[in-house]
Structure formats: structure tokens, C-alpha cells
Image (tube, rainbow, N blue to C red):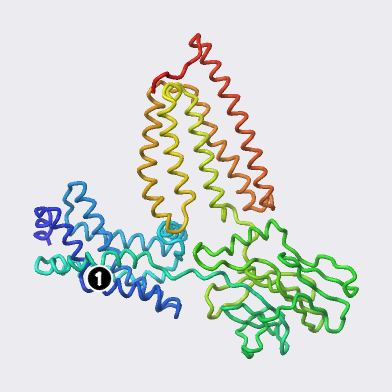
């Protein structure tokens, strides 16, 4: 092994990258690439489950290290450095194992992996599952493949194969089956003494105990209740007592006088209903949209001691009224079609601090950056070289805008543009700002104040206060206006103070 590493140090960089390419072009790696593509695009959608899930993990352990090592080797070659081949391979395998363990054992790792993968594939979704660590021994196989691929007699042919399989390898590690839309309860009715709930394209389930437990419905599919949902239902022994759903709302109304007057029996406010629509939104912007969280059908079942009311609430699941008059929401307890059930613990919370406000967070960052650049623009350096500062500030702000607003396949392009634009813009802004002795730095507090003005109302909306999104927007606008007025007054005072200190106004440079 020592001789191999010494040989790696002595050979030219082209030989090192050739060894990494040979690793990617080895028959075992090529076979793993094929398995990864076929499994993610064909087998997973057709037979979702443990086998297809673990198969992707094992294949990924064989494909990710050589792909990562190849990119590192070529990056080193461009930088005119010679990385040790064996150490590069070992580092790629170790990094793959560490990152895989992190994203499979922690919620933070899974969320970070989902966001990183979304830059390339917006439909990607990484779920923390410690049982996936069973795929880690495949990294030992990847090391053995590297040892074989690095041998000079085998390297040339494998290197040629790598040129062909490289695009497929990149596609394989980023390919993922489309994220299906959230299940949506479309219809509910009482049939053969059971409450039957139809969830099109997912399942049909029934309850014989008033919604306390659920099982797969064994009735005829031709008689499924999904075709004609009932929006009004009455108590069989008391036809004057009825319930109805309100279109496009999570709301159920009741009457006890045959429909002469109706009052609210159960509802969720419009603001919280909008929050639930975000909760159930399909994360794949190119995929099929999830259904709305809205009451769609109602059924009444007479039971000893009273009656039970069941309402199909679309993506929000089902809401049940028991004989005591208590209403409870039931959410879908599993995302997959097999064995899916309804449970009260699975109902989506009506508030979750900091969740589902990614676009608003991006807007707050953009506003804060604009406030920061405006504050820097009031100092002496930017006033002396306004054009230069304006160009650099525009490049910096635009680079952040690209990342914040990027979606779908444009995410990768935005990321590639962001790095050089952000670096150039930041360097230019700092160079102009620091060229003269910075003064009036207290104005820089406008940046965090502007961020808070935009973000805090939406953070409160995620907590349920305010409950209406429109109110949060109005509060953000009002707070931004207050920050703007205070910042402008502070800037005017700072300029007047500078004028008194210098004995004359600080004029902008006539030349740029």
C-alpha cells in the first residue's frame, strides 16, 4: 500500500485523474449506475417498498465515491496540483459514508440533503431512516473496485468507458422518482354499517367503530363511493337534523329545522386553511399538484346513543364528530398506499414556528441586503465612487436574487452564476467602502431591522398569530415603512453632521 501511495505521488496529474476515471468506468461501477437508474425510474414507482429503497442505497454507495473522486482529481488538475490517488479514493469513500450516515440518522441532515438535492432535482426528497445504514458495507466493495481499477493494465479501457458513463453517472445520482401529490379524501359515505372513505389513486378505507380504527375496505371497487360525493347528509331517524359542507372551505354547517337556518358546526379559519395548503403542497414543482384542503363530502351514521358525522376534507384527511358532539381531525398516518390509515396524531398542526415560509425568508434576505447596501452607499467611499459602487452592489444583490428565486432545472444554473457573481460583487463593495475611512456605521443596523420587519410577521403567521396571511403581508409592509423612515432620518442627520465637521458638503467624485 505504501508503494502504491508513493507511486501516486510521483506520477503526473493526468495519470491520477485517469485512475479515477478508470474507477468510474469499472464494470461494477457501470452496473451500479444502471441499477440506480432503472430502480429509481422504473422499479420504485411500480413496487415501492423496502427492497427497492435499499437497492438504491447500495447502488449509490458504489457510484457516489468514484464520481466524487473524479471531480476532485480534475479540480486538482486544473489547480495544477497532484492529489494522491489512493488518498483521494479513500477520502471520497469516507466522505460518502459520513454524509450518508448524517442524512439518514438526523432530521437536520435529511433536510440539508433535500435542499442540496433540490438544486439539481426539485422533486427530490430525502427521509431520515437509520435502517438505510445497512448499505454502508457496500463502501468496502467500492474500495475493492478502486484497487482493481487503479491497476495500469486495466486503466486505459476503463478510462474510455468512463467518458461514456460519466453523464449517466451524474444522472443516476440525481435521478429520483417523482414525488406523488398528497393523498386527498374525496368522498365518504355509510355502507353496510361502516364509514367508507375514498382516497382516489391511493386507497379506500372503512371504519366499523365510528372512526376509532380503520382497515382496508373489502367492498366492490365498482361500488366505490369516490364517484359521487354527497355534500349534505341527515340523521336517518331525524330528517330535520342535517349537515352540509361549504364549498372551498374547511367548514361544516348544521341545521335542526330541515334547512331553514344553518349554523357553523365545525370550521378552520381561512388563514389556517391557507397554511394547510402549504403543508400539503407537492414539493415537486414539475409534478402533479396536490388537492386542496377543503371539505368535499359528508356522511352521517346513526349509532347507539346518537350519531356520528364523517367529513372528507381533501388533503387534510377526515374530520369526525362523535356522539358527544366533539370534533376531531384525522390525518393520513402513512405516505404510501399500502397499509395507509387515518389517525388523530397524524393530523397536520395548524401552526409550526418557522416552517413553510421559505419564500418569505428569501424576501427578507433580499430586503435586508438592499438595506445594507443602501446604508453602505451613504458613507464617504461609495459617495466618491458611486458608479463603481452601484455596479458592484447590483451584481451582489442580483446573485442572491438568483438563488432565492431559482426553481426547477434553473437551480443549477443559478448556483453556478451565484458563486462568481457573489464573490465579485462582495469584493467590489468592500473595496469601495473601505477605500475611505468608513463613517456612519450605525446605519448598518438598518439591515437587521429590515430583515426583522419582513420576517417576523410571517414567523408569527407560521405560529398562528396573525392567523391570516394577508394580515402578515400588511404588517410586513408597515414595519418596512417604519424602518425606511427611521433609516432615512438617520442618514440625513449623519450627512448634516459630516457637513458640519468638514465645513462643506461631501461631494461625489466628478470622475469614476
User: Height in image: 466 above or below 504?
Assistant: below
Residue that sits furthest to the top in the current view:
503
Name the residue located 54 percent from the left edge and 40 percent from the top edge: 367
Q: Quadrant of the C terminus?
A: top left
Name the residue located 51 percent from the left edge and 42 percent from the top edge: 366
Label 1 sits on residue: 29
Alpha-carbon neighbours of circle 1 within 10 Å: few (<14), some, or many (≥20)?
A: many
Q: How many marks?
A: 1
Q: Is residue 344 left or right of residue 125?
A: right
Name the residue located 15 percent from the left edge and 57 percent from the top edge: 16
Provide the secondary structure element on which disc 1 rests: helix
Query: Residue 321 or 172: which is nearer the viewer?
Result: 172
User: Height in image: 430 above or below 33?
Assistant: above
Snapshot quadrant of residue 72: bottom left
Expressed as whole percent of the image width and height from the top left, the position of residue 87 reads 20, 57
Residue that sits furthest to the front in the current view:
511
Expressed as whole percent of the image width and height from the top left, the position of residue 320 reads 72, 73
Name the residue located 53 percent from the left edge and 31 percent from the top edge: 445
Query: Residue 242 or 326: which is nearer the viewer?
Result: 242
Expressed as whole percent of the image width and height from the top left, the position of residue 330 reads 66, 71
Expressed as whole percent of the image width and height from the top left, the position of residue 308 reads 77, 78
Q: Quadrant of the N terminus?
A: bottom left
Snapshot quadrant of residue 191: bottom right
Q: Is residue 149 left or right of residue 370?
A: left
Amino acid at each position: 500500500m505504501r508503494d502504491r501511495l508513493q507511486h501516486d505521488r510521483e506520477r503526473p496529474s493526468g495519470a491520477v485523474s485517469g485512475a479515477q476515471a478508470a474507477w468510474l468506468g469499472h464494470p461494477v461501477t457501470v452496473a451500479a449506475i444502471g441499477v440506480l437508474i432503472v430502480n429509481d425510474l422504473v422499479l420504485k414507482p411500480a413496487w415501492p417498498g423496502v427492497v427497492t429503497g435499499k437497492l438504491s442505497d447500495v447502488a449509490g454507495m458504489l457510484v457516489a465515491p468514484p464520481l466524487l473522486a473524479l471531480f476532485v482529481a480534475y479540480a486538482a488538475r486544473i489547480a495544477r496540483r497532484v492529489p494522491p490517488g489512493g488518498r483521494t479514493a479513500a477520502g471520497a469513500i469516507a466522505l460518502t459514508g459520513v454524509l450518508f450516515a448524517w442524512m439518514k440518522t438526523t432530521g437536520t441532515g435529511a433536510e440539508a440533503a433535500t435542499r442540496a438535492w433540490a438544486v439539481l432535482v426539485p422533486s427530490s426528497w430525502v427521509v431520515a431512516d437509520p435502517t438505510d445504514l445497512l448499505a454502508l458495507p457496500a463502501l468496502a466493495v467500492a474500495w475493492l473496485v478502486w484497487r482493481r481499477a487503479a491497476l495500469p493494465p486495466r486503466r486505459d479501457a476503463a478510462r474510455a468507458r468512463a467518458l461514456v458513463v460519466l453523464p449517466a453517472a451524474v444522472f443516476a445520482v440525481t435521478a429520483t422518482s417523482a414525488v406523488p401529490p398528497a393523498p386527498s379524501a374525496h368522498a365518504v359515505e355509510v355502507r353496510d354499517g361502516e364509514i367508507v372513505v375514498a382516497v382516489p389513486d391511493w386507497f379506500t378505507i372503512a371504519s366499523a367503530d365510528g372512526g376509532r380504527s380503520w382497515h382496508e375496505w373489502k367492498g366492490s371497487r365498482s361500488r366505490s363511493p369516490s364517484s359521487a360525493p354527497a355534500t349534505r347528509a341527515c340523521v336517518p331517524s331525524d330528517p330535520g337534523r342535517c349537515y352540509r359542507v361549504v364549498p372551498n372551505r374547511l367548514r361544516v354547517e348544521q341545521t335542526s329545522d330541515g334547512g331553514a337556518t344553518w349554523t357553523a358546526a365545525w370550521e378552520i379559519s381561512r388563514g389556517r386553511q391557507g397554511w394547510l395548503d402549504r403543508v400539503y403542497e407537492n414539493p415537486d414543482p414539475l409534478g402533479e399538484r396536490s388537492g386542496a384542503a377543503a371539505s368535499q363530502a359528508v356522511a352521517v351514521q346513526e349509532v347507539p346513543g346518537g350519531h356520528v358525522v364523517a367529513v372528507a376534507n381533501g388533503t387534510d384527511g377526515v374530520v369526525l364528530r362523535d356522539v358527544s358532539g366533539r370534533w376531531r381531525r384525522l390525518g393520513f398516518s402513512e405516505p404510501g398506499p399500502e397499509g395507509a390509515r387515518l389517525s388523530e396524531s397524524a393530523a397536520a398542526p395548524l401552526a409550526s414556528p418557522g416552517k413553510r415560509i421559505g419564500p418569505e425568508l428569501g424576501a427578507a434576505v433580499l430586503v435586508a441586503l438592499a438595506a445594507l447596501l443602501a446604508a453602505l452607499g451613504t458613507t464617504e467611499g461609495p459617495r466618491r465612487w458611486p458608479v463603481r459602487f452601484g455596479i458592484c452592489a447590483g451584481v451582489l444583490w442580483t446573485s442572491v436574487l438568483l438563488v432565492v428565486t431559482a426553481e426547477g432545472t434553473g437551480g443549477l444554473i443559478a448556483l453556478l452564476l451565484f458563486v462568481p457573481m457573489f464573490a465579485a460583487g462582495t469584493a467590489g463593495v468592500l473595496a469601495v467602502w473601505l477605500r475611505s475611512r468608513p463613517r456612519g456605521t450605525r446605519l448598518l443596523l438598518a439591515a437587521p431591522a429590515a430583515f426583522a420587519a419582513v420576517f417576523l410577521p410571517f414567523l408569527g403567521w407560521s405560529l398562528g398569530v396573525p392567523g391570516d396571511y394577508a394580515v402578515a403581508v400588511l404588517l410586513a409592509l408597515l414595519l418596512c415603512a417604519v424602518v425606511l423612515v427611521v433609516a432615512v432620518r438617520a442618514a440625513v442627520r449623519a450627512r448634516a453632521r459630516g457637513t458640519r465637521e468638514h465645513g462643506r458638503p461631501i461631494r461625489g467624485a466628478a470622475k469614476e
